[in-house]
Amino acid sequence: MIPFNRTHISENELDYLTEAVRRGFTCGDGPFTRRAGGLLREMTGVDYVLLTTSCTHALEMSAILLDLKPGDEVIMPSFAFMSTANAFALRGVVPVFVDCRPDTLNLDERLLEAAITDRTRAVVVVHYAGVACEMEAIGKLCERYELALVEDNAHGLGGFYRGRPLGSFGCLATQSFHATKNVQCGEGGALLLNDAGLVARAEVIREKGTDRGQFFRGMVDKYRWVDIGSSYLPSDVLAAQLTAQLESFGTIQIRRHAVWRRYHDELAGWGTVNGVVQPTIPDGCAHPAHLYYLLLPDLANRQALIAHLSKMDVQAAFHYQPLHVAPAGVRYGRAAPGGCPVTEEVADRLVRLPLFADLAEADVDRVVNAVQTYEVG
Ligand SMILES: *Cc1c(COP(=O)(O)O)cnc(C)c1O
């Protein structure tokens, strides 16, 4: 079976893990945490980077940092991961779900203004598949209405919008290093801060609401409970794995792009004949080959293609189910005016193909052949 995903072991990964364990500094904020943070700063151009235990936790930190109160509203796409909404629902904040664009499947910026109310405090964007949202239009609206902009950049590390790295647009951006992402340490994440004024409080929130960070820098003489927070600091052992992965980012990306490009070129003819839509990459967007998806004409064909691929030993996967109609989405949030008809449709039609750095050329041949032998009915 060709799996949907397999983790890549980068060049120095096992050595760094051994080094971290031998050094005995296995709790958070050790030497590897600093190294991984430095690499992320270089990649994104964002000055303040805090490694976290997950992207979910970085989103929870964002909700605390923005001082959101119960009843406040945060606008986000319905076509997103549940953590994007859950992090805000945890604070009593109401997620307001906006529909996606039919081409990039990103939050449709043309629907954003109609979703704004006098309770709206922030907009969270997800760069689906690492293809940038229309950041110029979204940024302008956020400025005009004085809304905080947060990027859930779980897919977008290494992606650009008009030459500027994804993760550098919001006052806050979150990264994921879950096993399924381009670079991974099993479970991990980061919070990127573009606003120096938020850094001190972010450190406190990440350290169980204490001023432990300032204590270790000699700025206070004892450390105390000073704010709300939680335990969002990853082990330096995980940071060691992540450091090695980030150092191999170039190699990982060359291989992922090669697979992405082959799918895109070799399935184009089959797609045209069968009415299957391939990803759209707008001008000015450079994506990081996070995932390769196809949009089938309908749910029945999507399911039949997944079954057909499975029979040919290729594991394919559907993706996000609309948040605005999910049980918790209905309980804690609501759809923006007009609902999310595009999201409902594409969620049923989308299938993702295997894409990982160590996918062999011959296995790409097999996936392409397996897809091409499916006839849309
Ligand atoms: C993977 C993912 C997350 C969650 O990441 P974790 O690190 O597993 O918490 C959040 N948002 C998006 C868009 C994701 O793809």
Image (spheres, rainbow, N blue to C red):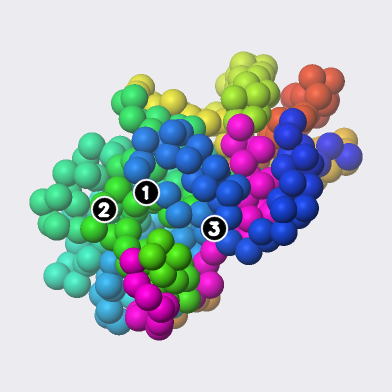
- Label 1: which residue? 48
Is disc 1 surrounded by few (<14), some (14 to 19) or many (20+) residues within 10 Å?
some
> Hey, what amino acid is under mark 1?
Tyr
For the point 22% across and 44% down, the residue is 139
Secondary structure at badge 3 equals loop
Please say if the residues under marks 1 and 2 sit with CB atoms less than 8 Å apart: yes
- Label 3: which residue? 29
Q: How far apart are marks 1 and 3 (CA)?
A: 14 Å
Secondary structure at badge 2 equals helix
- Label 2: which residue? 196
For the point 39% across and 55% down, the residue is 77
User: Is residue 255 or residue 226 the one in the foreground?
Assistant: 226
Is disc 2 surrounded by few (<14), some (14 to 19) or many (20+) residues within 10 Å?
few
How far across and how far down the image is residue 221, in percent? 37, 75
Is 59 displayed left or right of 298 in the figure? Answer: left
For the point 28% across and 67% down, the residue is 66
> Hey, what amino acid is under mark 3?
Asp
Magenta residues, start to end = 219-247
> Hey, what amino acid is under mark 2?
Ala
Does label 1 or label 2 sit earlier along the sequence? Answer: 1
Taking the magenta stretch, the answer to whether it contains residue 239 is yes
